[in-house]
Structure formats: C-alpha cells, structure tokens
Amino acid sequence: MTILITGSSGKFGKDSIEFLLSKGVQPNSIIAMVRDESKGKQFKEKGITVRIADYGNEESLLNAFKGVDKLLFISSNDVDHRIEHHKSVVKIAKQVGSIKHIVYTSFYMADEIKNGSATSPIFFIEKPHIVAEELLKQSGINYTILENILYTDFLTEYFFGEKVLENGIFFPAGNGIGNYATRKDMAEAAVNILLDDGDNKDKHINKSYKISNDESYSFNDAIEILSEISGKKLTFTSPDIVTFETALTGLGIPPIYIQLSVAFGLAIQNNEFKTNHTDLPSLLNRKPTTLKQFLFETYKK
C-alpha cells in the first residue's frame, strides 16, 4: 500500500509524515509530494519517495499520483487559485484509477453557511472547500472529509503577535468563543483514518467528520493563560476594525494580511468556530490538546 501526502513540505504535511513513520509505516510506502525538489531532501534522507508536482500543473499531478493507493489531499493554500487547484486534484485522482481512498482536509463551517442561508466574512476561504467536497462526493472515489476547525496554532502564529508575552493581545476577536484544535492533533487524526485497516476499515468511507476541540475558549481565556506563563498580568484588547486596520497599517503590514486578519476577527466575534459536536476525540482515542497545554508548550521554553 502506498500513501501519498500532498503539500508534504508544509506544516500539516510534515506532521502527517512524522505520524505515519511513528505508527510503523515503512518509509518506502510513503510518497511525499512537493513543488520544489530542494524541499524533498528532508524526506529522501528518511527513505521516503519524493515526487515533484504542483496543483497548478495537471501533468505533474498525473505523474505523482500513478500507483498511489491512498491520498492525503491537503487543501491548496493559494487563496486566488484554490478552486482550480482542487478541481485538478480530484480530476487527476479519478484519471489515474489506482487511488482507493482520499482523505481531504476541509474547513469547518456552519451548515447555514454551507447551504447559503447565512453569510460569513471568511466565505472566500470557505467556498473552495465547499467546491472540493462536492467534487469528492461526485468523484466515485472513496473519500473522508475532515472539517477542520481553525488551528489553535493560527492564534499564536498570526493573531497574538510576536511580543504577546510583553504586550498582551491586540486583536478584534471580541467575546467570541471557538473550539480551536491543534494542527498536530488534526494531522494525527488524518493519519489514523488512513491507517485504519481493522475489522471496521470501511467505517470512514464516504464520511464527513467535525474536527474540533471538545473545549471552547475565548481570547480572554487565552490571556489568562498567557499571564500565568509570563508571570505578569497581560491584557486583551479587542479594538474596533478601523483602529485595528490603522494600527496594522502603521506597522507596515501588507493590506492582504490586514484584510485576512479582519475577516477572521469578525468570524471569531460571530462564534463561527464554536461547535457543540466533535469527532476528534474518538479519532484520536484520547482528549485533544487543550489551549493551556498548547500555549505552555509554545511559550514556556
């Protein structure tokens, strides 16, 4: 059995490959798909097969997917071309004929947003996932869709700021609550599905899973934990949008990143990442990593 991981040089891809190896998969059964040959060196050193391909080049995908049994399809990170990329992946997966199961990293959204009865400030992020899910369901290939909530990692990587332990949090999240889960937990869940070949090996086939934490958190919760880590009282400030945009512009942040931050801030304010149901604990067979655990691991060094 061969398992191909798209986007292998990204964080989710790397984590997935590490979990495959740690769970006993032989390196020669793993195929790491990367866009740049230089990024494949780290995998070749471990005995993993590397194939060079790009979502924007269907011929390269055709060569990469040949002989593959299972595919971990990590969604494109190219906001402008995501829909075209997702169409190409599913098209070529059907064309090669060998792929028996696709596990896709989708994005969590409320049913009202998915069916069009409600709007979202981050719909431009969500729409390519809606398209990909429909393509998979119509493909004839066995699929599992992982509706991944916003990564806990995104809070520290993009929203808190580099000097959060000195300056606190300045982000327009309001009192919004979210069931954020870590990227590593999501990658492990994806790998567990790919490797589940027991008596109930078909239980994941043509299923969609809600991948989120079983605990919910606000940014006020986060600042309390960060205060504990730093040893001093930190503050969380949720500015109005104009104030936030002005502050980031003054720091020289490119407009596209300001727009993304505002959109996610508004989505958090709207509780779009709050859910009362999750499949993550059962897929991990353990409790997901809590916000406190993650923040201590990230900052208590």
Image (cartoon, rainbow, N blue to C red):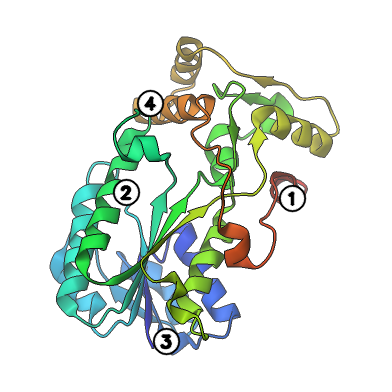
- Mark 1: few, some, or many residues within 10 Å (few <14, many ≥20)? few
Nearer the N terminus, badge 1 or badge 4?
4
Q: Is residue 292 visible to the viewer in this orientation of the structure? A: yes
Whole-percent x, y for residue 15 in the image:
53, 65
Using the image as rendered, state which of residue 135 and residue 5 is in the foreground. Answer: 135
In space, the residues marked 3 and 1 are separated at their CA atoms by 33 Å
User: In the rendered structure, which amino acid carries the disc numbered 1?
Assistant: Gln
Q: Name the side, left or right, on which 130 lies relative to 61.
A: right
Residue 164 is tagged as none
Using the image as rendered, state which of residue 157 and residue 152 is in the foreground. Answer: 152
Nearer the N terminus, badge 3 or badge 1?
3
Q: Is residue 161 visible to the viewer in this orientation of the structure? A: no
Whole-percent x, y for residue 62 in the image:
18, 74
User: In this figure, which residue is indicated by the disc labeled 4?
Assistant: 259
Whole-percent x, y for residue 19 in the image:
56, 73
User: In this figure, which residue is indicated by the disc labeled 3?
Assistant: 29
User: In this figure, which residue is indicated by the disc labeled 2?
Assistant: 129
User: In this figure, which residue is indicated by the disc labeled 1?
Assistant: 293
In space, the residues marked 1 and 4 are separated at their CA atoms by 30 Å
Q: Name the side, left or right, on which 243 lies relative to 77.
A: right
